[in-house]
């Protein structure tokens, strides 16, 4: 993806690009989001993509508001407000401490208060909370902070994610779609009227939307396909209605809190997410770790004025894994000289490290 590579290279707050000899005078681009406001839905710790995106926006001068699922709200806020906070994870590239202006309880499973069930209100996680549906939170943000410029959807949940599609219940399948795909539509419906022209919306997808990824079950692959399709349609509708861009980032595997719950290893063995990371490093064009900050910087570029003409796109940030058609560590190809050579070089590089 040339677009992804080009925007990903130009994401530090001030980046100077010098023209070659004989070309026009050098141009200077800067990402300065001072005076801008972002609402990031789906931040619950310092390990995930939501945190990384919020942190990069803040480093560029943007005010950051966060929406957190009530089930994990307590522990998140407690650590955030503690003396140590999130430690080094909270220190930005400029040496300053990343701060969130406000954390709102937000359950993306409810568009308005009328959808909240008595059972939910009786849950210990929701005790003392009110106005955590999307519409209520949007109204609070409008009243307390005015309009916003950026909207980030970093949310995915499938209660039956460990089940293959053949075993998923209707309820589990629809729950995955509701939490992981429709929630983007609900957010845009309620926050869209609050967004300033020229702003942007970002969500997080996964390659299972278009490729078969055994183990990523529960209807989550379907939900990601919906998310990417909705991104294209929303790009048109939101672009015409509000002058706002809508894109999604298809990110590679990361050992976040949510991803770690997909499938745990047995008797100390590696779990699904660890094996997915190993697979990516063994087979992707770029054999390296993927960090949350890689996605954070790409999101910053897409949301900033540098991405002003990019909309309706699925941008891959996965070390190029999506481009591969065959696993180079496949046992099936082990006898073939070319693959033997590839694997030999990979072992040698691993030994050098």
Image: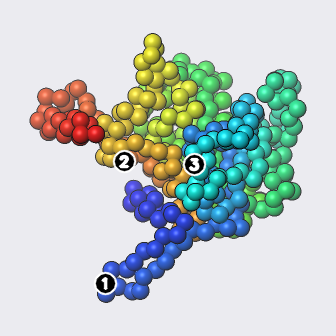
What residue do we see at 82% from left, 30% from top? 126
Q: Are marks 1 and 2 in contact (CB under 8 Å)?
A: no
Label 1 element class:
loop
Q: Quadrant of the N terminus?
A: bottom left
Label disc, if present, on residue 320 of the rendered structure: 2
Above or below for 229 versus 33: above
The disc, 1 or 2, on the residue closer to the chain's N-terminal end is: 1
Vertical relation: 183 (above or below) 161: below
Residue tagged by mark 1?
Answer: 21
Give the numbered dot on residue 52. Answer: 3
Q: Badges 3 and 2: C-beta atoms under 8 Å apart? A: no
Task: For marks 1 and 2, give the CA distance.
Answer: 32 Å
The residue carrying pointer 2 sits among few (fewer than 14), some (14 to 19) or many (20 or more) residues within 10 Å by Cα, namely: some
Please give the count of numbered marks on the rendered protein: 3
- Secondary structure beneath label 3: helix
Q: What residue is drawn where x is 69% and y is 52%?
A: 99
User: Where is residue 85 shown, x and y percent of the image?
Assistant: 67, 42
- Residue 288 placement: quadrant: top left
Label 1 or label 3, whichever comes before in sequence order: 1
Instruction: Report the quarter where the C terminus lies.
Output: top left
Distance from Cα at disc 3 to Cα at disc 2: 20 Å
Sequence-wise, the earlier of marks 3 and 2 is 3
Mark 1 touches mark 3? (CB < 8 Å): no
Which residue is at the far left? 337
Q: Position of residue 128 (x, y in %)?
A: 88, 32
User: Are there few (<14), some (14-19), or many (20+) residues within 10 Å of tag 3?
Assistant: many
From this view, report whether residue 301 is shown above or below residue 45.
Answer: below
Distance Cα–Cα, label 1 vs label 3: 37 Å
The residue that appears at 86% across and 56% down in the rendered structure is: 143
Instruction: Pick out the residue farthest to the front.
Output: 83
């Amino acid at each position: 993806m040339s677009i992804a590579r080009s925007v990903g290279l130009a994401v530090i707050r001030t980046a100077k690009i010098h023209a070659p000899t004989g070309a026009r005078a050098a141009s200077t681009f800067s990402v300065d989001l001072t005076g801008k406001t972002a609402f990031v839905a789906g931040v619950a710790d310092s390990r995930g993509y939501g945190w990384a995106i919020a942190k990069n926006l803040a480093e560029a001068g943007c005010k950051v508001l966060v929406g957190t699922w009530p089930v994990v709200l307590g522990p998140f806020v407690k650590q955030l407000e503690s003396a140590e906070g999130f430690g080094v994870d909270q220190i930005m590239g400029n040496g300053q401490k990343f701060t969130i202006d406000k954390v709102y309880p937000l359950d993306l499973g409810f568009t308005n208060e009328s959808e909240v069930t008595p059972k939910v209100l009786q849950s210990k996680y929701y005790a003392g909370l009110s106005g955590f549906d999307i519409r209520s939170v949007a109204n609070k943000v409008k009243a307390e902070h005015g309009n916003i410029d950026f909207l980030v959807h970093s949310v995915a949940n499938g209660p039956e994610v460990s089940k293959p599609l053949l075993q998923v219940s209707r309820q589990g399948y629809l729950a995955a779609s509701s939490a992981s795909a429709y929630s983007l539509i609900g957010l845009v419906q309620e926050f869209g009227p609050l967004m300033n022209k020229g702003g942007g919306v970002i969500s997080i997808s996964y390659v299972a939307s278009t490729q078969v990824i055994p183990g990523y079950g529960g209807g989550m692959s379907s939900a990601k396909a919906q998310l990417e399709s909705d991104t294209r349609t929303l790009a048109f509708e939101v672009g015409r209605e509000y002058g706002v861009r809508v894109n999604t980032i298809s990110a590679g595997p990361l050992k976040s809190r949510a991803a770690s719950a997909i499938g745990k290893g047995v008797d100390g063995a590696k779990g699904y997410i660890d094996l997915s990371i190993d697979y990516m490093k063994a087979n992707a064009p770029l054999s390296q770790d993927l960090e949350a900050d890689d996605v954070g910087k790409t999101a910053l570029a897409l949301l900033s004025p540098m991405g002003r003409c990019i909309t309706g796109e699925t941008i891959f940030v996965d070390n190029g894994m999506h481009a591969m058609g065959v696993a180079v560590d496949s046992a099936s190809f082990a006898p073939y000289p070319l693959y033997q050579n590839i694997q030999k070089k990979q072992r040698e590089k691993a030994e050098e490290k």
